[in-house]
Image (cartoon, rainbow, N blue to C red):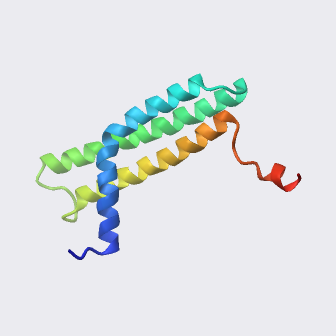
Amino acid sequence: MNIPIESFAVYLLGFIGLAATGLVPYRSWLLIIELIKSEGRRRRRRSVLVVAAVISAGALWSDIQIGARVFTCLTEAYCGPGVASGWGYLAMLGVVYLAFEALSYLLRKAARGSGVCLQSRIFR
């Protein structure tokens, strides 16, 4: 089986997007709960929680929109301009999920106060 790298990337992101349809709401919930219970300064925790809520809402909105497109692909005769339009939609959701996970990792680090500060390392 000889698959070009672009096709492999679309299929890989598509499978991640397929899993993300259920993981985005679950991971959003876990992120919000973890940030509420986190230790640290109150002002920092509150601001990180607001940013996390906005990012979670954006990821959930993307999940709903792309999930509706995939549902339309599965239930109607026309899916899109190409044969693999459904995989393209799922790959977009996979990219959204990976971006959400990367941002949630950074938010967890920021909530703990263990983020990397370049200025303090330079001037030590």
In the displayed orientation, state which residue is furthest to the front. 124
Relative to 45, 118 lies left or right: right
In the displayed orientation, state which residue is furthest to the left. 77
Q: Please tell me whether residue 54 is drawn above or below residue 16 in the rendered image.
A: above
Residue 52: name its quadrant: top right
**Where residue 81 appears, x then y in whole percent?**
22, 64
Q: Which image quarter is the N terminus in?
A: bottom left
Relative to 13, 48 lies left or right: right
Number of marks in the image? Answer: 0
Residue 65 seen in the current view: no
In the displayed orientation, state which residue is furthest to the right. 123
**Where residue 68 appears, x then y in whole percent?**
26, 43
Question: Which residue occupies the foreground of this view, 108 or 74?
Answer: 108
Question: Which residue occupies the foreground of this view, 29 or 109?
Answer: 109
Residue 25: name its quadrant: top left
Residue 35: name its quadrant: top right
**Where residue 3 appears, x then y in whole percent?**
26, 73
Q: Residue at x 33, y 50 (%)?
A: 17
Q: Residue at x 36, y 39 (%)?
A: 23
Relative to 114, 79 lies left or right: left
Relative to 86, 111 lies left or right: right
Q: Please tell me whether residue 49 is drawn above or below residue 65 in the rendered image.
A: above
Q: Residue at x 88, y 51 (%)?
A: 124
Question: Which residue occupies the foreground of this view, 123 or 49?
Answer: 123
